[in-house]
Amino acid sequence: MWNFTAGGFSLRLPVTEQDNEALFVLLNDAEVAAHIPRLPLTVAAQALDELRRVAMRFETREAAFWLVENNAGELIGRIGIQHINWLQRSARLQWEFPASVSQADLQQIVPAVLNYAFSELGLHRIEMRLEPGHALQQQRLQALGFQREGCLPAQLEFEGRSVDLELWSFLATDRR
C-alpha cells in the first residue's frame, strides 16, 4: 500500500484534481523549497502541471511523492523519493516543509518514508541534495541521522548561475 501513516500524520499519494489548490498554496511559499534550486509556483495551473508530472513519474516507477497531512486533514508539506535507480537500489529524497514543521514532526515523518523505501521497495541508499548554506535543512538532516558526504560542485545551472549541491545520505544499515 502506497498510502500510510507516520505518527500523527497521514502520507498519501496526491490526487491530481483534488489537491491542486492545497499544493499551490504550499509551493507558492518560496521558503518551503529554498534549499532546492526551483522557483516558487506563481499560478494555480503550475500546481496542476506538477501533480500531473508526479503522477506520470509514479506510473513509470521513477518517483513517488506523498502529501503530508496532519490529523485535521490539512496539508503541512510534501515528501518524496525520486530518481529511483532500481539497479543500484537507490533514490533521492526531496521534501518541502515550512519552517513551522518541527524536528519532532520530521522525526515521525521521515523515518516512516525511509522505512518504506528500504523495507517495501528494497532500496538500500537514500540521498538528499540541497544548496549549501541552508542551516535549518542541514540541522534537520543531521538530527535524522543523515551523513554529509560532501559538496558536488556545479551540479546544475539555475537562473543563470552554477549551483553546488551538498550530498547527504542515509543507508538501510543506518536504521536504528
Image (cartoon, grey):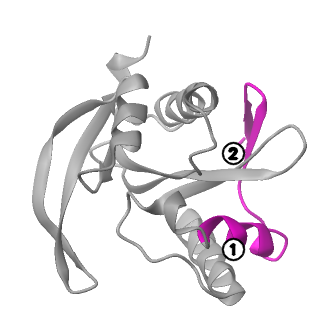
Question: Which residue is depicted at the point 33% across and 38% down?
Answer: 138
Question: Which residue is depicted at the point 57% across and 77% down?
Answer: 53
Q: Residue 24 carries which label?
A: 1
Sooner in the amino-acid sequence: mark 1 or mark 2: 2
Image depth: mark 1 or mark 2 in front: 1
Percent x, y for residue 6? 70, 29
Determine the secondary structure under disc 2. Answer: loop
Contact between marks 1 and 2 (CB within 8 A): the answer is no
Label 1 to label 2: alpha-carbon separation: 23 Å
**Quadrant of residue 43 in the image?**
bottom right
Q: Residue 2 carries which label?
A: 2
**Which residues are drawn in magenta?**
1-27
On screen, residue 150 versus residue 77, left or right, reads: left
Percent x, y for residue 56? 58, 74
Percent x, y for residue 165? 21, 56
**Quadrant of residue 38 in the image?**
bottom left
Q: Is residue 119 magenta?
A: no
Residue 67 in view, yes or no: no
Which quadrant would the C terminus be assigned to in this image? top left
Crowding around mark 2 (Cα neighbors within 10 Å: few <14, some 14 to 19, many 20+) is few
The answer to whether residue 91 is above or below residue 26 is above
